[in-house]
Image (tube, rainbow, N blue to C red):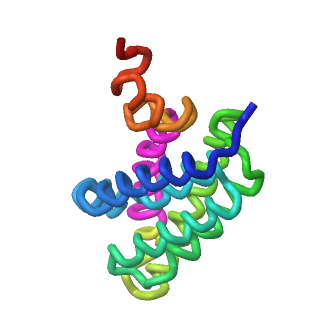
Amino acid sequence: MQVHDTNRHRRDSSLLALACLVLQIALAPNLALANGHINFALVFCAVISLTVGGSWGVLCGFVAGLVFDLCTTGPVGLMAFLLTVASFVMGMESRNRLQDDSSAAMILFFIVCFGVCFAYNLAMLLVGQASSVVDVLFLRSLPTFLLTSLTFLPFAYVRSRGSLRLLGLGAQARRHGGRRGLRKR
């Protein structure tokens, strides 16, 4: 039985948003494969959409995309639009897909991730920040897709096991002294 606790979702979402924001600003520009970089905004939006979904997932996707746009040199609003659509597609059922059917959730994420990476880099070609279709597909979209997909896996694993308790950040972990299974006596 799944209990809908909006305060827990908001608290977990804000912790995840803060972690992804710090990683996007500090780590993503420094780790590159060809011209592809990790998109932590897409990771955040996917985790929230696949676990909570609904209007909360769409709102988080829009805000994450807007923050991503403000942190990069691309056109403002492009990633916000793409992540809003991606959040809507991934969170349509408003249920925790990562716990219910994790393999289908992963497949859905991989499809949406490639679509977002390709659409964003194709738009970069149209505004003149990429040189050719080969550059867009093989040097930007595929490396970004691979890096973002590999980065998504640990986040999805932690969230599929139930909240942020595995990291020692959830309310139950605080009650039990920060470690899972250990109780204060």
Tell me: residue 50, above or below residue 122. Answer: above
Quadrant for residue 143, please give it.
Answer: bottom left
Q: Quadrant of residue 33?
A: bottom left
Horizontal arrangement in the rendering, residue 129 relative to residue 58 (left or right): left
Place of residue 134 in the rendered image (x, y in percent of width and height, measured from the top left): 45, 68
State whether residue 47 is above or below residue 73.
above
Residue farthest front in this picture: 185
x and y percentages locating residue 74 in the rendered image: 39, 80
Q: Total marks drawn?
A: 0
Which residue occupies 43% across, 77% down?
132
On the question of residue 50 being in view, the answer is no
Q: Residue at x 34, y 27 (%)?
A: 178
Residue 28 position, x and y percent, is 30, 58
Q: Which residue is at a point 44% across and 88% down the rendered structure image?
A: 127
81 vs 113, nearest the viewer: 81
Q: State the extent of the magenta-drawn residues as a range.
A: 137-157
In this picture, is 90 found above or below 102?
below
Quadrant where the image shows the C terminus: top left
| SS assignment for the magenta stretch, majority | helix
Relative image position of residue 67 (x, y in whole percent): 41, 72
In the rendered view of the protein, which quadrant contains the N terminus?
Answer: top right
Going 26% across and 55% down the picture, which residue do you hit? 27
Rendered position, 103 above or below 141: above
Q: Nearer the viewer, residue 111 or 72?
A: 72
